[in-house]
Each structure stands twice: as C-alpha cells, then as structure tokens.
C-alpha cells in the first residue's frame, strides 16, 4: 500500500469519528469539567496513557487545573492525591483493561467523579463510570487493526477540543498564557515587546526633511541601521529612507542624487509600530511586506525607536509557531 492510500485511509477513519461522535454527550462532559472547582485527573494505560498525559499537560498550561496520574503509581500510594469532588478521567480504547478496573473502585471510594473515554460500547469500564463518552472508531490504520494508530488520534482530538473549550469558558487570555510560559520560544513570543529590542535615544538615525542626502549619508553609514528616519523638530515621523532607496536613486539619478532633499526621496507613509506592541508582531509586519527589515517605533507619531529584523531574529523569535 502506498503512502497516498494510507493518507486517504487515515482521513476516512478520522472522518468517521467526526461524523458519528455524540456532540451532546461531549457538551455534558464539558459542563461537568467547567463547573468543577477541584482538580481534573487523567489516567490511562499504554498508548492511551500517553494521550491522557499530553491532554492533562496541555490543560494545565492553558489555565485548567489538571494532572496526570499513572495507574501503577495510583495503586501504590499516589491515589492519595484524589480528593472528594475531583474529576477522574480515564482514557481507554477497550474499556476492559484490568489495571483500570482494579483502580476505579478505589477512586470512587474517594468520592471523585469518574468519566471514561472509550471506543468500545458496553465495556466494563463504561458500566462502572459516572459518565462516559464513546469515541467512534471505524478501525485502526494498522493493517492488522491492532496497533493504536487511529484510536489514539481521536482521543487526542477529543482532549484538545475539551482543552480549548475550557480555555474559552475561562476567558484564558494571551497575557495568562504568557504568565504560564515565561521561558522558551513561546514565552519570548508572547512577552518580548518592541521596546525590549528597539534601537533608541542617540542611536536612532534621525534627519530632517530639508537635509540634503549628501549631508546625512554619514548618519546612514555610522548608525548601521539600514535607514534614516525623517522627522520634524518635534520628532514627529514624516518618512523613511532606506539603503534600498539609496541604491535605487543612484541608479535613477547618478549625477545629482547627492543634492536631493530628504522630503523629495523619502517614503512618506512608512509602516510603524508602537513600542508596547509585541516584537513578534513587528516581525510579522516585516514578513508581510517581504522586503522590509526595519520599522520605526512611534508614540502618537513621535519617533521613539527603530526595530530591526536582525535584532528580532537574534532574540530567538520565530513567527511560525504563534
């Protein structure tokens, strides 16, 4: 079987899930989770356990109190973390795993609500759970219908949908996300501001509209910013002149370009950004325009800085993952 057929089959099996999942039952489970003031505890065995762990960690990072409790650890003392009112969610394809069946009675003794997420109707786990949802599974992608290659996908889809639904119900903001992700690439993208990276004060390459290009070329060269910002006496931005503009004007008028005034050759409506904006948004603005590598930073049109693509990249930012 070639890859194209495998992709088509995978899509077919996932479509079967989406076409047959009980959204009303999913809503009922979401309401239970949303109304809970206690912890949401996930567990599972084997590959389902990995999915349960991932869902718990994603929920935790997006504002929902969730943890993953391995079945073996729970049966050897860690069940003590389960308290009255907790929601105990069990991921299991078959709903017949002995380790889970041994654990659930002890969880219920601790007065936690047990919700099973299964793909086998009328299983033993379904019958001893307080609530359950059936994830429709046509078959595994595995040619022997054994290796969990579709069942784990639909478990993950269901878990991710619950996670995002809870984010929305809790009004989990980008600022909340930033607080939960202070380090790494995600943290930088949602915490690093333009003012943290911008060139400022005496390092800003400023000139006036009536300056001749020959009189400010040294500023363009010495500041090493790739541009000149043209401003009035109150530092209000009037335009921008870049290295690229210089090359173009030399090509067009090589004999007299040096005597051009800045207001004659500047771009009069440059893209700008506020210093309080995210640095990643400055990168996106540059990428949208393809050839822009610098953006003036303003406050009410007054020049307060300049941000360069070079500095954003050096800071370790990438717009691809946000």
Image (cartoon, rainbow, N blue to C red):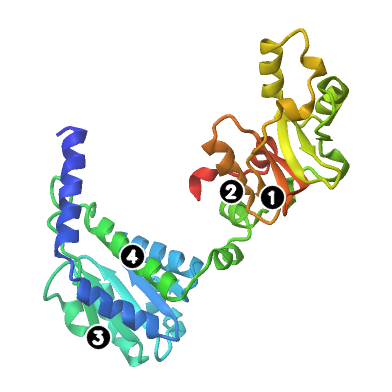
Mark 2 crowd level (few <14, some 14–19, many ≥20, 10 Å Cα): some
Q: CA distance from mark 1 to mark 4?
A: 33 Å
Residue at the top extreme of this rendering: 255
Q: Specify whether residue 142 is in view.
A: no
The residue that mark 4 highlights is: 161
- Give whichever of discs 3 and 1 has the lower sequence position: 3
Q: Where is residue 107, by image quadrant?
A: bottom left
Q: In x, y percent, where is residue 82?
A: 42, 84
- Give whichever of discs 2 and 4 has the lower sequence position: 4
129 or 240: which is nearer to us?
240
164 or 279: which is nearer to us?
279
Q: Where is residue 127, by image quadrant?
A: bottom left
Q: CA distance from mark 3 to mark 4?
A: 21 Å
Q: Secondary structure at mark 3?
A: loop
The residue that mark 1 highlights is: 194
Between disc 3 and disc 1, the foreground one is 1
Q: In x, y percent, where is residue 7?
A: 21, 41
Q: Given contact means CB atoms under 8 Å apart, are the residues at marks 1 and 2 in contact?
A: yes
Q: Where is residue 177, by image quadrant?
A: bottom right
Q: Specify whether residue 93 is in view.
A: yes
Q: Is residue 61 left or right of residue 166?
A: right
Q: In x, y percent, where is residue 1?
A: 14, 34
310 or 276: which is nearer to us?
276
Mark 4 crowd level (few <14, some 14–19, many ≥20, 10 Å Cα): some
Q: Given contact means CB atoms under 8 Å apart, are the residues at marks 3 and 4 in contact?
A: no
Q: Residue at (48%, 69%) from the top-left corner?
A: 60
The residue that mark 3 highlights is: 130
The residue that mark 2 highlights is: 281
Q: Is residue 158 above or below residue 142?
A: below
Q: Is residue 51 left or right of residue 264?
A: left
């Amino acid at each position: 079987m070639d890859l194209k057929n495998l992709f088509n089959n995978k899509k077919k099996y996932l479509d079967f899930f989406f076409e047959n999942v009980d959204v009303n039952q999913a809503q009922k489970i979401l309401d239970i989770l949303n109304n809970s003031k206690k912890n949401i505890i996930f567990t599972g065995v084997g590959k389902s356990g990995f999915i349960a762990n991932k869902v718990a960690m994603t929920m935790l990072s997006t504002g929902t109190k969730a943890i993953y409790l391995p079945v073996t650890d729970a049966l050897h003392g860690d069940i003590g973390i389960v308290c009255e009112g907790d929601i105990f969610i069990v991921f299991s394809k078959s709903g017949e795993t002995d380790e889970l069946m041994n654990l659930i009675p002890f969880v219920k003794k601790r007065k936690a609500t047990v919700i099973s997420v299964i793909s086998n109707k009328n299983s033993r786990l379904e019958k001893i759970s307080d609530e359950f949802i059936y994830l429709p599974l046509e078959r595994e992608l595995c040619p022997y219908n054994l290796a969990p290659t579709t069942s784990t996908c639909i478990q993950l889809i269901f878990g991710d949908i619950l996670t995002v639904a809870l984010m929305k119900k809790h009004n989990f903001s980008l600022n909340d996300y930033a607080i939960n992700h202070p380090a790494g690439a995600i943290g930088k993208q949602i915490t690093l501001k333009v003012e943290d990276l911008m060139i400022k004060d005496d390092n800003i390459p400023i000139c006036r509209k009536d300056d001749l290009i020959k009189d400010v070329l040294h500023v363009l060269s010495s500041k090493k910013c790739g541009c000149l910002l043209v401003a009035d006496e109150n530092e209000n931005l009037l335009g921008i002149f870049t290295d690229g503009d210089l090359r173009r004007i030399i090509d067009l008028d090589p004999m007299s370009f040096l005597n051009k005034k800045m207001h004659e050759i500047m771009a009069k409506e440059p893209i700008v950004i506020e210093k309080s904006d995210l640095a990643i948004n400055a990168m996106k603005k540059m990428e949208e325009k393809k050839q822009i590598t610098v953006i003036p930073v303003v406050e009410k049109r007054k020049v307060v800085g300049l941000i360069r693509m070079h500095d954003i990249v050096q800071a370790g930012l990438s717009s691809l993952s946000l």
